[in-house]
Amino acid sequence: MRRTVAIALLLAGCGAPAQRFALRPTMWIDDDRRAFVGRPAELETPAQWDRIDHTIFRPLAELWLYERETEAVNVNALDEVPSSSWFTNRIGLTPLRPERLARGACRELDTPPGPYTVTRAKSSGTSPGLFVRDASGGNHLMKVDFDLPERGTAADSIATRIFWGVGYETPCNRVIFIQPEDLVLGDGEHAPSREDVEALLTQAVRLEDGRVRVSLSELLPGTPLGGWLYSGIREDDANDVVAHERRREVRGMVVLSAWLNHIDARAENNLDMWVEADGDRGWVQHYVLDAGDSFGQIFPQSLVMSQSFGLSHYVDFQHMLEDFVTLGIAERPWLGARRGPAGDVFGFYDLERFDPHEWRNGYPNPAFEDATERDRAWMARIIARFERAHLEALVATGRFERELTATELVRILEGRQQRILERYLTRLSPLTFPRVIGDRLCLRDVALESGLRRERSYTATALPGWPTERRVPLAAARDDSSACVMLPADPDEDYWAIDVVAATPGRETTGAARVHLYAVDGGWRVVGLERLEP
């Protein structure tokens, strides 16, 4: 299987001639949950090694390596990502009600019942925490805000639900308020002392009535196998056959991370879980575990570094070289950054300095660096489906004390969303999900659906018998938020390609959406969609 994938990757870069799409249903399920024998070993990726490797050793190893840009390989015939153990099509494919999105990975939004028995302390990661068991037997990781008031616990809830809505698997995270006496010490071997618990609670945000604000993250089902990497494959996972940096859902995460300023996308914040099927057989489920760094994390050691989050790597050799060559006179957008109306809650998370295409993760990320325009545009089409009502419902789960804090976060999210759509829906075609309705071919126009554009014109050209030089103009018009093309009543070829171009008067003309169809059994079958360069 792996040899087959490697050959396919090699051939994909050889400039093969245009090929027709096969007459078969579009693949929407990538069945990589096939049970196999032999649970993979737990993968340990020390945080310091992950950081040093991606910051220094990998860039040095690739310094003299020329690698041609390649497209993601796990894309179906309609330029979308099939659902798998890595990704589940949600809001990008099917509308979600705000209340459903607000529930995210949780079975319900209600607070798990207390008291909470502390079983052990969290030993990994940068933020302190406790493992607790609620009164109904559910197990959770409890954390508090350790850098900015409310931000970390709110981000655990809000950002994780956004990841879930997009399509990633995540834990169920909640913001809850407890009294200190709601924490009961367990009697297990690893149970912490009351002093350890008090040390954590002293860092938490407290309300006037004495309640403590915490984040409660429900533990995932299965056996932990360690964090998944942003490159390579897990050799002992029989279903892992596509290099992670070649997966579109992993590459496209760079745009989602830019939206939220999730600067800590690395192996330690992901998790693979072994899910038992029967006996010693099972399969691996991939999770995004922690997005709690989103919305403006602050490093107490360096205010300037905190101002540069999302604009520069922690150690950014390109920027260091530019500063050296220009003697430090290069203008940097993070210098002089100020906190917004919400004060300390969001640090320097803002709209004004945001350029989605220039955004940078804290550490260099191989999958993010390999992301192509098509990968980024795919994620932008999903992000476009989040409406204001969705954002308000999501932000409400952060349970901010002040209404101003919530409205400010909605404002920034909306503004950054618009910049993402402006950048990635105006070059490659935003037309998507082609379907035949009677005698018309219609495609949804995400630029119209999202409100990015209000005026639209379309042109369509047919290429009967594609690949061919013969071109036939077709009538195209807007129908609500879709572009619709009149199909020939009596086609003289059994295979057609139809180029549909969207334009905004006085602004952009995007590349064509090329839809591939078969004329069969007196009707039409859509079999493929390409997005051509402008």
Image: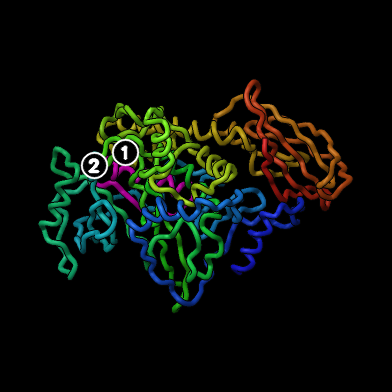
Would you identify the image quadrant in which residue 228 lies? bottom left
Whether residue 215 sits left or right of residue 530 in the image: it is left
Which residue has dot 1 on it? 305
Where is residue 191 drawn, in percent x and y? 17, 65
Whether residue 264 sits left or right of residue 448 in the image: it is left
Q: Residue at x 74, y 31 (%)?
A: 459
Mark 1–mark 2 CB contact (< 8 Å): yes
Would you identify the image quadrant in which residue 124 lies? bottom left
Q: Secondary structure at mark 2?
A: loop
Q: In this view, which residue lies farthest toward the top?
A: 506
Whether residue 357 sits left or right of residue 111 in the image: it is right
Quarter placement of the N terminus: bottom right
Q: Secondary structure at mark 1?
A: helix
Q: Above or below — where is 490 with respect to 87?
A: above
Q: Point out which mark residue 301 bears.
A: 2
Q: Residue at x 75, y 56 (%)?
A: 23
Where is residue 308 drawn, in percent x and y? 35, 36
Whether residue 102 sits left or right of residue 110 in the image: it is right
Q: Residue at x 47, y 45 (%)?
A: 254
The answer to whether residue 411 of the structure is visible from this angle is no
- Give the class, few, some or many, for how many residues have Cα within 10 Å of label 2's Cα (few <14, many ≥20): few
Residue 268 lies within the magenta run: no
Residue 161 lies within the magenta run: yes
Where is residue 303 drawn, in percent x and y? 27, 36
Would you identify the image quadrant in which residue 26 lies? bottom right
- Residue type at tag 1: Met
Query: Which is more toward the observer, 243 or 321?
Result: 321
Q: Point out which mark residue 406 bears.
A: none
Q: Which residues are magenta?
A: 150-176
Q: In this view, which residue lies farthest toward the bottom?
A: 279
Query: How many discs mark residues in the rendered view?
Result: 2
